[in-house]
Amino acid sequence: MFSFGTQTNTNLWTFNDDKSGLQFSQTSDIENAYKDLFKRIFPDINLDPSTPAGQIITYLTEQDTATIQGIQDFVNYFFLGGSGQMLDLWAYNQYRITRKSAVKGSVLIDIIGVPETIIPSGFIVSNGELQFETYAEHTIGDSGNIQIQFQQVEVSEKIALQNTITQIITKIDGVDSVNNPNSSTAGTLRESDTQFYKRALQYGSIYKNSSFASILANIANVSGVEKISGYENPTKSQVVYRGITMEPHSICVCVLGGSDLDIATEFSYSKPPGCGMVGDTKVPVEVEGKEITYSFYRPTLKALKFEVSCVIYTNSPSSYQTIIKEAIKNYINNLNIGVDITQPSISKVCEGVANGFVIDSVKIGLKSGAVGWDTIALNLNEMASVSDSDISVTSKG
């Protein structure tokens, strides 16, 4: 009944297969329907809201609106998960997954001041747009400076560029100046109804159709997990895949974020018996009175460097270097674990932000080696990383 496109019942409701689901008439439509009914029976009746008839219509409209809202919520919960708390309940009951909470962005701040000055929790600094605060107490050392991790006061997907957080909002005697030598990380907003619903459906589909894929899906939904990669060796022979030696009938999973115990506990629920595991992080979990050790990897950072040459003009933006650096860092930071870095992909990233200037050449390499055009191959348990100081942007024009 409720499938394939849009079903419509002329005046009462519409139903769509997307997240909008069942939608009844608006309150104004209901009120107008009652007014039309009263007018047909009593052509000369006064329906002003202050009159008895108008008050009756208002009451009936409110009652009908409450009733159909309940029906709408129930139907959408049953077929599409609903919204808000009803969607949370549906997703948990169906798949035992929960909505991803908002994650605040963070930044390292250099503080200069008088030795022994206490920096309290909740100390706030700003770049004029975003505010960041400490979440623990710190003390300036004998050198007169300290570097502290701050987090956003309010979650925002925006970032503060390097050397822009210089305003002290919480005034403290003994704190002279603040500054961020590197750009902040962006925050992540709370998962929306649409995003959560799509993830729940994807998870449900994976869970039903693929054993190893379901393991990855389960681990990906562990609280705090940000990235995950993995490989399954279903053969009877030992194999080497992306730098990892795997025994017959074994799996390898590499996880960024989440606690070791939470991840191992999820493995105890998801991993089928008789399946070997590869990894240097080993966590014992008690399963039915027996202690079983689950193994997985944490990603090893592979530091990279980049050299970008631009052609600039008299009207080129003065911040072209920062624009290119931020584009490269965002691209690298959003890559999954074990993804190779290619020169064409970095060139495309740079060209995508080149507004008012032209990209002349792009070279890539490991921080410890030379730059060039060769692909940087990463192992399954390696993850690319880069800092501002390892991105060189030069110009000619």
Image: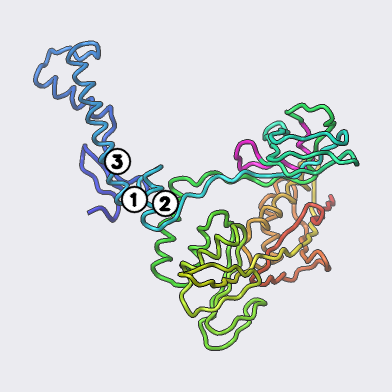
Can you tell which mark lies on residue 23?
3
- Work out whether mark 1 precedes mark 2 in sequence or the reverse, and give the earlier one: 1
Q: Is residue 161 above or below residue 214?
A: above
Between the C-alphas of marks 2 and 3, the distance is 18 Å
Q: Is residue 161 magenta?
A: yes
Q: Identify the element where label 3 is drawn.
A: strand
Q: In the image, which is nearer the foreground, mark 2 or mark 3?
A: 2
Q: Residue at x 85, y 36 (%)?
A: 116
Q: x%, y% of residue 97?
A: 44, 55
Q: What residue occupies the far right of the structure in this picture?
A: 143
- Whether residue 140 is visible: yes
User: Hey, what amino acid is under mark 1?
Assistant: Leu
Q: In the image, which is nearer the foreground, mark 1 or mark 3?
A: 1
Q: Identify the element where label 2 is drawn.
A: helix
In this figure, which residue is indicated by the disc labeled 1? Answer: 80
In this figure, which residue is indicated by the disc labeled 2? Answer: 197
Q: Nearer the viewer, residue 176 or 182?
A: 176
Q: Are marks 1 and 2 in contact (CB under 8 Å)?
A: yes
Q: Is residue 46 above or below residue 102?
A: above
Q: Residues within 10 Å of mark 1 (few under 14, many from 20)?
A: many
Q: Residues within 10 Å of mark 3 (few under 14, many from 20)?
A: some
Q: Residue at x 70, y 38 (%)?
A: 134
Quadrant position of residue 176 = top right
Between the C-alphas of marks 1 and 2, the distance is 8 Å
User: Hey, what amino acid is under mark 3?
Assistant: Gln
Q: Residue at x 75, y 48 (%)?
A: 357
- Work out whether mark 1 precedes mark 3 in sequence or the reverse, and give the earlier one: 3
Q: Which residues are magenta?
A: 152-167
Q: x%, y% of residue 54?
A: 21, 16
